[in-house]
């Protein structure tokens, strides 16, 4: 019978969940240790009658000094509470030197003291966030230990042969034997031991403040002391043992799904000749280059190339574009790079400031300094000027509306040059735009073409998870580890040079306890392919504020650069824009006038070449913020919105 019962108990034991016990210790409730620090003492009030035998000719007033604080301590932390109590009792030095004073005989007088106490400081402790940070406060009871002073009176400098009297070393009279005041402070407990150890050590840096009230060391006169104490305490205590039972780990349940889209070829793309505005705008009251502009360090110059600021072309040609502003904000780096490659080129920087020419010149000087210091451009190749108003101002005489925005645009540095390698083709003069930047449209696989792996509940269930993909030849690729629940991987990363493929997918999750959980699935991956269609081209020309006649300066550019690139049987879309300054109706007419001027020039060139195969589409969007190429918050955005955008499309089809 006994043997049968023994076998049953063993069998039941194997069926029970396995339990693990791990010994840990709670934070100690009692802590003992020592505290040490420096007392920064500040004297105020007056002291003249030092004791019954000595009254100095002139009263001493302010002073300061640094003294030692050292004390054993004990703390009690109420269990499961933010409250506690503290007690420090030890040596408390309030020494200091008074500021030197001059006696009626024109003799310098010095006074110092080594005042010190035995201090008793009980405090209430409060840790509001239940972490190491705490604040404390309570009374201070101090018993005088030392009240000595040293007094010295020098000689009149007008009588160099005069001999100074000896220093007086004595004790202050009328010193309070007991002082009752207060103190408040804050500290942070930094554990030095783990909770796996019974004896736990804690380091606690602290700072306390002991204000002047109650801190008068003498019963006479008005001398008082304010003290700031900075130090640290080293404490230790015994933690109470706690046993944490860990039940058998149950594998978590997660939802694992895979989505591999059927990929279609990409859309047409556009390459752009982007005009580079020759203005650098400055913040109000500042002569330093705005942090909106990309500023390189000297060791980054060797890696800078114009095409490094190129980004993917947007599909929507009429939508807002952030990439062009990225190009513009590199204007100083592009300028420096071009000047470095063309050592015969030179520029003039013209700073314009509403505060006057001197302020404008400082703005120009900051741009010059950047080019000289970072790109190592020779100082003699860059001239600087200062003006109150720019040569081509946005704020016109007699203007009445939106003057703040116009003044903001006129606070700028204009880049002027006669060097053709820096300028737009067929351009010269103070309003000539810089040579445009060529932005090559690049087709990239859209995010919608990526293979998506979703492990629902992974954040709670796993510390990390990874993927193993096995192709039909048995080759295994591993991806991860991951912590997020959804991961998207480009098809080309999975397929390499293959157009498609079948894969077995294994999700391998690791729980915080180290357990492994797996889920499996199958996918077919199809590689996204770029479009083989011919790409379009985009050109832009810029205008000054409220200007429709500036088209004359672009006529040769449109005739000899843009028109010859119009494809056979192509389509030309011309879109005029303005900024938001001014009346809406006026801006609408202005944008259309700009667009029609461009059309007229291009039509004339095509007619002279006996071409009638091109279709035109002309639109004037005015200040329509939904169609503006850029925003209107910053002066550079408004400056770029004064534009005509010209899209040259093949086969009479829009992009």
Image: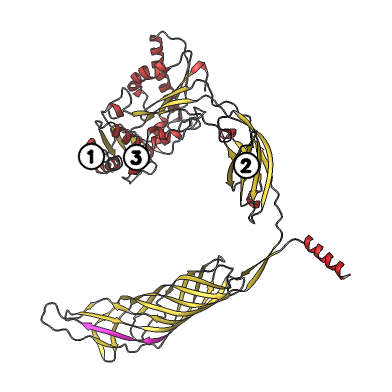
Q: Quadrant of residue 65?
A: bottom left
**Residue on which the image places disc 3:** 301
Disc 1, SS = helix
In the picture shown, does residue 260 fall above or below 459? above
Disc 2, SS = strand
Q: Nearer the viewer, mark 3 or mark 2?
A: 2
Viewed as shown, does residue 170 lie left or right of 652?
A: left
How far apart marks 2 and 1 lie (CA) works out to 59 Å
x and y, in percent, of residue 87 in the image = 50, 79
* Residue 570 or residue 464, whichever sits in front: 464
Q: Which of the two discs, 1 and 3, labels the residue nearer the N terminus?
A: 3
How far apart marks 3 and 2 lie (CA) works out to 42 Å
Which residues make up the magenta segment? 141-153
Asked whether 152 falls inside the magenta stretch, the response is: yes
Packing grade of label 3 (10 A; few <14, some 14-19, many >=20) is: some
x and y, in percent, of residue 573 in the image = 47, 20
Disc 3, SS = helix
Discs 1, 3 touching: Cβ within 8 Å: no
- Image disc number at residue 468: 2
Q: Which of the two discs, 3 and 2, labels the residue nearer the N terminus?
A: 3
Discs 3, 2 touching: Cβ within 8 Å: no
In the picture shown, does residue 543 fall above or below 92? above
**Residue on which the image places disc 1:** 379
* Residue 390 or residue 609, whichever sits in front: 609
């Amino acid at each position: 019978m006994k043997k049968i019962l023994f076998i049953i108990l063993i069998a039941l034991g194997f069926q029970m969940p396995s339990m693990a016990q791990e010994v840990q210790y709670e934070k100690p409730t009692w802590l003992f240790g020592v505290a040490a620090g420096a007392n920064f003492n500040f004297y105020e009030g007056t002291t003249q009658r030092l004791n019954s035998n000595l009254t100095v000719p002139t009263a001493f007033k302010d002073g300061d000094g640094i003294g030692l604080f050292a004390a054993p301590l004990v703390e009690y932390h109420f269990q499961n509470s933010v409250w506690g109590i503290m007690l420090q009792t030890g040596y408390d030095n309030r020494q200091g030197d008074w500021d030197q004073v001059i006696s009626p005989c024109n003799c310098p007088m010095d006074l110092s003291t080594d005042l010190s106490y035995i201090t008793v400081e009980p405090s209430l402790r409060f840790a509001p966030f239940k972490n190491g940070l705490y604040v404390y406060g309570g009374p201070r009871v101090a018993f005088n230990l030392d009240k000595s002073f040293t007094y010295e009176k020098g000689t009149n400098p007008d009588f160099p042969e005069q001999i100074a009297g000896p220093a007086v070393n004595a004790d202050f009279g009328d010193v309070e034997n007991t002082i009752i005041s207060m103190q408040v402070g804050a500290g942070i407990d930094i554990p030095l031991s783990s909770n796996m150890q019974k004896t736990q050590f804690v380091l606690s840096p602290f700072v306390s403040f002991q204000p002047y009230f109650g801190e008068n060391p003498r019963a006479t006169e008005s001398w008082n002391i304010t003290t700031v104490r900075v130090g640290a305490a080293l404490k230790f205590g015994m933690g109470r043992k706690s046993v944490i039972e860990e039940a058998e780990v149950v594998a978590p349940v997660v939802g694992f799904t895979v989505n591999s889209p059927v990929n279609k070829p990409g859309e047409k793309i556009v390459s752009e000749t982007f005009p580079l505005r020759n203005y650098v705008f400055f913040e109000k009251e500042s002569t330093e280059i705005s942090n909106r502009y990309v500023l390189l360090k000297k060791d980054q110059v060797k890696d800078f190339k114009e095409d490094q600021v190129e980004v993917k072309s947007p599909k929507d040609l009429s939508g807002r574009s952030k990439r062009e502003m990225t190009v513009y904000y590199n204007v100083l780096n592009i300028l420096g790079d071009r000047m470095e490659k063309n050592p015969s080129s030179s520029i003039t920087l013209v700073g314009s400031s509403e505060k006057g020419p001197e302020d404008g010149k400082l703005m120009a000087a900051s741009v010059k300094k950047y080019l000289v210091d970072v790109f190592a451009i020779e100082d003699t190749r860059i001239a600087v000027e200062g003006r109150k108003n720019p040569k081509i101002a946005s704020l016109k005489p007699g203007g009445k509306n939106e003057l703040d925005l116009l003044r903001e645009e006129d606070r700028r540095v204009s880049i002027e040059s006669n060097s053709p390698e820096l300028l737009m083709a067929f351009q010269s003069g103070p309003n000539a735009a810089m040579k445009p930047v060529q932005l090559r449209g690049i087709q990239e696989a859209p995010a919608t073409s990526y293979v998506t792996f979703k492990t629902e509940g992974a954040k709670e269930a796993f510390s990390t998870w990874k993927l193993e993909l096995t192709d039909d030849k048995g080759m295994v690729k591993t991806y991860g580890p991951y912590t997020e629940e959804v991961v998207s991987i480009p098809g080309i990363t999975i397929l390499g040079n293959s157009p498609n493929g079948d894969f077995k997918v294994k999700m391998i999750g690791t729980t915080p306890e180290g357990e492994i959980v797996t889920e499996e699935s199958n996918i077919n991956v199809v590689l996204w392919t770029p479009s083989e269609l011919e790409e379009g081209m985009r050109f832009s020309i810029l205008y000054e504020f409220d200007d429709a006649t500036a088209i004359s300066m672009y006529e040769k550019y449109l005739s000899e650069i843009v028109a010859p690139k119009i494809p056979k049987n192509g389509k030309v879309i011309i879109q005029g824009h303005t900024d938001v300054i001014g009346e809406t109706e006026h801006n609408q007419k202005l944008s259309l006038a700009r667009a029609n001027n461009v059309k007229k020039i291009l039509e004339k060139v095509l007619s002279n070449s006996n071409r009638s195969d091109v279709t035109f589409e002309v639109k004037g969007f005015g200040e329509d913020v939904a169609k503006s190429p850029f925003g209107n918050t910053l002066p550079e955005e408004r400056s770029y919105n004064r534009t005509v955008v010209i899209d040259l499309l093949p086969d009479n089809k829009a992009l």
